């Protein structure tokens, strides 16, 4: 097996872009080319002005500035990059299927299959193929089957190397990964291929953080890691509802249980519901796989995590309507935040989308401010739901660049993303400009330290009883 000098990554999205940037940064002697069919995305990756990169991640621009043009390249010439590469990462999107068998549950593998077929068509020498996208267990087998039938005598080794980075902390997660997981075949060639990939990561990570397993364990571990993380969020969210009616405080409960080293303190923030491209998709995938194998109890167990998450989003929207005297019709509701978490411009599966949908069905007017999400993205998220009349969206939704404008004359504020800047606002000024009584619905538990009640706000915080300055 020849040493890896040339890497290609198919898919320059939230995973492929940052991962390749860090691999290139840490391996200056390896040429890394990230390709994508989407021309405007590649153009943005090549933009001189680093503020215009297609994704926002703290620290990403600095890494791109260091490596781009040296050994990191972004291109739309997929065939050329495949041809030149010793190692090809597949990092294309694998959304939940929206049609046919497994609709709404199974992962749609059409983009993966297209990649495999393209590699099969173009490759003229042996290559290591690395699955980077989140995939259902046994996808490597399907990819292998396509690649092994090219008829041009090329050998492929398929590795699974799931990505564990979280958006908003992608660069930090890559540079200081808890672990890297590499799954491969237990054959001589399989081991050599795994070693090639181990070497790439070992250029910056300690060897004991690089785990090698069989392909299936690696593929399944990714789904399970995300399922466990999402389950923690649904667990604490379930407790938040209980806290609201018992006068317990969910943050105090989270702190108390997190001190148990078996439970640990992380990932216990009650929220308006988890979002992001992975959690829901991966759990649905796990549920689908379990059901297909006749493991109904296993499927039901994990499905409950999603049911709880949907419930959390619904009840937050209902709480707003109920508190505003059972009607939000023609009232202005200000949304602070649209991204699915802070420090990212990604909105996939964001709870804000579903809260907006519910409130629009109740004929509310919504004004949205998010520091990083663009207006066209918000409109496209709402239209994509397919449940709202496009005219209604146009009439009732406004996106603004100034948070004070968003909250001016609003009946209520809904905090849906935990952006740090939200707690720095002049809340006296906000209060003065709002319709009274002025309501705040804190879906992220970030306003505790602000004592908004002192300005006379009526505040609902998830996992706590509603409070006013009258107690
Ligand atoms: C997740 C996994 O963390 C990552 O390892 C995997 O590679 C991809 O999926 P990501 O979706 O980018 O990453 O972000 P994450 O930080 O996990 O947050 C997911 C959602 O859960 C967000 O909506 C976040 O706000 C929510 N969340 C997280 C909570 O509501 N409470 C918490 O305590 C933690
Ligand atoms: C538990 C709590 O751990 C403790 O904090 C509380 O005060 C009382 O309840 P206990 O029931 O004594 O303590 O033992 P624990 O070690 O928690 O085990 C409970 C059960 O879970 C046992 O049957 C154990 O075998 C099982 N278990 C535990 C597993 O099957 N797998 C594990 O990974 C851990
Ligand atoms: P992720 O969060 O998994 O990175 P994204 O949707 O952000 O998902 O990125 C996936 C990228 O893969 C998209 O930019 C898409 O255009 C690209 N892509 C999908 N199929 C192909 C293909 N066959 N060749 C090249 N790029 C592809």
Image (spheres, rainbow, N blue to C red):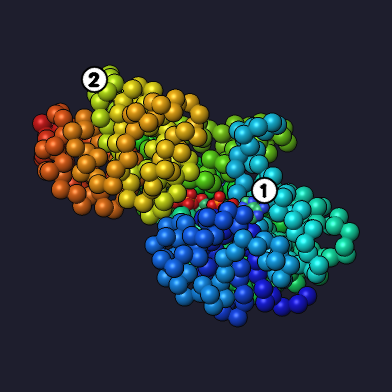
- As helix, strand or loop, the secondary structure at mark 1 comes to helix
Q: Residue at x 70, y 31 (%)?
A: 101
Name the residue furthest bottom.
Answer: 29
Task: Tell me if residue 347 comes above or below residue 166 in the rendering.
Answer: above
Q: Quadrant of the C terminus?
A: top left
Q: Residue at x 56, y 79 (%)?
A: 28
Front in this rendered view, residue 68 or 153: 68
Q: Would you call the spot at circle 1 few (<14 residues within 10 Å), some (14-19), or many (20 or more)?
A: some
> Could you tell me residue 137's position as x and y percent?
69, 48
> Where residue 252 sits in the image (x, y, percent)?
29, 44
Image quadrant assignment for residue 365: top left
The answer to whether the residue labelled 2 contacts the one labelled 1, judged by CB atoms less than 8 Å apart, is: no
Between residues 18 and 274, which one lies in front from this camera angle? 18
- The quarter of the image holding the N terminus is bottom right
Viewer-proximal residue among 226 and 438: 438
Q: Alpha-carbon distance for marks 2 and 1?
A: 48 Å
Reading the image, the residue beneath label 2 is 325
Mark 2 residue element: loop
In percent of width and height, residue 332 lies at 25, 30
Residue 423 as seen in the image, left or right of residue 256? left
What residue does disc 1 label? 111
Is label 2 or label 1 in front?
Answer: 1
Label 1 CB sits under 8 Å from any ligand 3 atom? yes
The residue at the point 62 percent across, 46 percent down is 94
Crowd rating for badge 2 (residues with CA inside 10 Å; few <14, some 14–19, many 20+): few
Look at the image and tell me whether residue 378 can be seen.
Answer: yes
Which of the two labelled residues, at mark 2 and mark 1, occupies the earlier sequence position?
1
Say whether residue 448 is left or right of residue 106.
left
């Amino acid at each position: 097996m020849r040493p890896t000098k040339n890497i290609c990554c198919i898919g320059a999205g939230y995973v492929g872009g940052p991962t390749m940037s860090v691999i290139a940064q840490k391996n200056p002697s390896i040429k890394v080319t990230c390709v994508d069919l989407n021309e405007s995305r590649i153009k943005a990756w090549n933009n001189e002005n680093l503020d215009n990169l297609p994704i926002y991640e703290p620290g990403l621009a600095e890494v791109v500035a260091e490596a781009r043009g040296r050994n990191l390249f972004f291109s739309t010439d997929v065939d050329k990059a495949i041809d030149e590469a010793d190692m090809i990462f597949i990092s294309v999107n694998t959304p939940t299927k929206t049609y046919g068998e497994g609709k709404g549950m199974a992962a749609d593998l059409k983009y993966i299959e297209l990649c495999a077929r393209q590699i099969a068509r173009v490759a003229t020498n042996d290559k290591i193929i690395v699955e980077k996208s989140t995939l259902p267990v046994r996808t490597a087998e399907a990819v292998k089957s396509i690649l092994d039938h090219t008829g041009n005598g090329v050998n492929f080794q398929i590795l699974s190397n799931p990505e564990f980075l979280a958006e908003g902390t992608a660069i930090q997660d890559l540079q200081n990964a808890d672990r890297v997981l590499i799954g491969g075949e237990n054959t001589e060639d399989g081991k050599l291929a795994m070693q090639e990939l181990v070497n790439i990561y070992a250029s910056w990570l300690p060897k004991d953080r690089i785990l090698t397993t069989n392909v299936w364990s690696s593929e399944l571990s990714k789904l399970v890691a995300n399922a466990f993380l999402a389950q923690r969020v649904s667990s604490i969210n379930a407790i938040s509802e209980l806290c609201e009616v018992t006068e317990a405080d969910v943050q105090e409960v989270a702190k108390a249980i997190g001190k148990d080293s078996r439970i640990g303190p992380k990932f216990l923030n009650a929220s308006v519901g988890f979002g992001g491209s992975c959690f829901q998709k991966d759990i649905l995938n796990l549920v689908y796989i379990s059901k297909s194998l006749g493991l109904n109890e296993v499927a039901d167990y994990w499905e409950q995590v999603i049911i709880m998450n949907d419930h959390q989003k619904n009840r937050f929207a209902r709480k707003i309507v109920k508190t505003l005297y059972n009607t939000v019709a023609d009232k202005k509701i200000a949304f602070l935040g649209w991204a699915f978490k802070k420090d990212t411009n990604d909105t996939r599966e964001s709870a804000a989308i579903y809260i907006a949908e519910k409130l629009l069905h109740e004929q509310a007017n919504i004004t949205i401010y998010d520091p990083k999400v663009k207006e066209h993205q918000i409109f496209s998220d709402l239209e994509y739901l397919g449940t709202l009349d496009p005219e209604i969206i146009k009439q009732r939704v406004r996106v603004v660049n100034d948070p004070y404008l968003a909250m001016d004359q609003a009946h209520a504020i809904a905090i849906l993303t935990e952006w740090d800047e939200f707690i720095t606002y002049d809340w006296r000024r906000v209060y003065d400009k709002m319709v009274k009584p002025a309501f705040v619905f804190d879906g992220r538990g970030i306003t505790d330290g602000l004592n908004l009640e002192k300005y006379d706000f009526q505040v609902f915080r998830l996992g706590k009883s509603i409070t006013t300055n009258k107690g």
